[in-house]
Image (cartoon, rainbow, N blue to C red):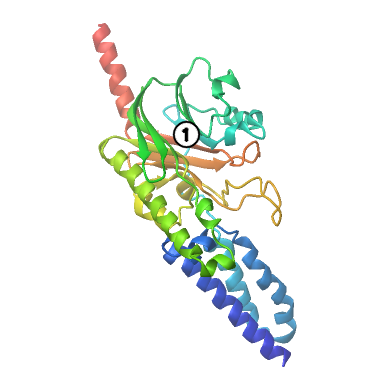
Amino acid sequence: MASLIVERTSYVYLGLVILIWYLISEVSETWWLSTALTYLPRRPYMIPGVILLPFAAVFHRQSIWMLLGGIAIVFWPLSGYKFASATSTPNNQSINLVTCNVHAFEPSFERVLNEIVTANPHIVCLQEAYNDGKTVKDHTVFFDGWFKIQRGEYFIASQFPMEFVGEVEVPSLERRSAIVVKIKSPMGEFLVTNIHQTTARHGLSELSIGSMFTGGPASVEEYQRKRAEEAFTTRVFLSEQGWKTPTLVLGDFNMPSSSSIYQRNWSTFQNAFDVAGKGYGFTSPCNTDRLWPNNTPWLRIDHVLASHHWRINHCQVAMDNGSDHRAVAASVNLRGSRRRSNRTRRDDSSASN
C-alpha cells in the first residue's frame, strides 16, 4: 500500500511540475492563472519532491527518478538557471553598463552607489530616481563631470557625450515608459534606452477567492492587455529610430524574459544575462511582506538588452539590497569598434601631417 501511494504521489508531483512549466513558458501572460504563476516564486516547487525522496528510497525506488526529474525541471528551466556560455574578455574598447531601479533612493542609495562604483561603469541608467523633489544630484557627487540627463524618474549618466532623442508616452496607463538618448563614443554612435514598464502586481492585486466570481480574472486580463500595449508602444518607438543604429535597452522591464509579452516585443534583442550570466540572477523583490524572507528576490525582471551590433562580454547581478531591485551590470563591445577606432586614429594622423 505504501509503495502504491509513493508511486502515484510521485507521478502527480512530476505531472504538476510539467503542467506549471508549460503554463509559465507557453501560456504565460495570455491567461490570468498563468500570469499569476509567472510572478510567484518557483523554487519552492522543489520542496514536495525533496520531501518525497526518502519515502521513495524506502518504499518505491523506481519513483526516485520521477522525483529527481521534477526537481531538476524546477531547478533549471522553470526557475531560469543560466550557465555562462558566451563570456568574453573585456578590452579597452569595452563599454561597462549598469542599470538599477533605485526605489526612490530607499532604503539605502549609498549601498546601491557602492555597487555602481564597483562596476566601473561608462553608462548608468536609473529608474525611480526621484523622491519629494530630490533627484540623483541631491544624493551623490559621484556623477559630477559626467554627461547627465534626467526626465522625471529616469536618470542617465554617461562618460561620453549624449543628446536626448525622445520619450515614450503610454496614454492607456497615463505614464512614460522610457526615454531614449544618443551616445557619441569613440567607438561609434549608438542609442541607449532607459526603460521602466509597469508592474503586473497592480493587476494581480485584484485577485482573491471572492473576486473569482466577481470579475477578478477579467480585470487581470484587461490590465495585462494594457501592459502588452505599453511594451508594444515602446518597441515601436525604438523601431522608428532605425534598425541600423546600434541600440542598448536597460532598465526595469517588470517581467521575466520567459514572459509572453517580453517574447513578443523584446526577443529580437540579446539579453545580456541570458547570454553571459550565471545562476538565477534574480533582481526583485528584495523587500517583501510576510510569507517570504527579506532580501531574497525570486524574479529576474531587470535586464540589459543589446541589438545584434553588440558582443556581450559578461553580465552579473549585484548582491546588496540598497533598493527593492538589485543592480545589473554588463560589459559589451560594439562589433567592429576596434577597426573603427584604428581607422579614426589613422585619419587623425593623416590630418595632422
Q: Quadrant of residue 52?
A: bottom right
Q: Is residue 280 above or below residue 67?
A: above
Query: Which quadrant holds the C terminus?
Result: top left
Q: Position of residue 193 (x, y in %)?
A: 39, 35
Residue at 73% in and 80% down: 55
Residue that protrudes farthest toward the top in the picture: 353
Q: Position of residue 252 (x, y in %)?
A: 49, 42
- Foreground pick, 270 / 351: 270
Residue at 28% in and 34% down: 245
Query: Which quadrant holds the N terminus?
Result: bottom right
Side of 5 relative to 126 (left or right): right
Side of 254 relative to 247 (left or right): right
Q: Is residue 349 above or below residue 339?
A: above
Total numbered labels:
1
Q: Secondary structure at mark 1?
A: loop
Q: Quadrant of residue 109?
A: top right
Which residue matches tag 1? 90
Residue at 69% in and 55% down: 292
Residue at 41% in and 41% down: 174
Q: Quadrant of residue 182?
A: top left
Mark 1 surroundings: few (<14), some (14-19) or many (≥20) residues within 10 A = some
Q: Position of residue 285 (x, y in %)?
A: 61, 47
Q: Position of residue 48 (x, y in %)?
A: 67, 72
Residue that protrudes farthest toward the front in the picture: 214
Residue that protrudes farthest toward the bottom in the picture: 1
Q: Is residue 4 above or below residue 31?
A: below
Amino acid identity at mark 1: Pro
- Foreground pick, 167 / 348: 167
- Foreground pick, 255 / 210: 210
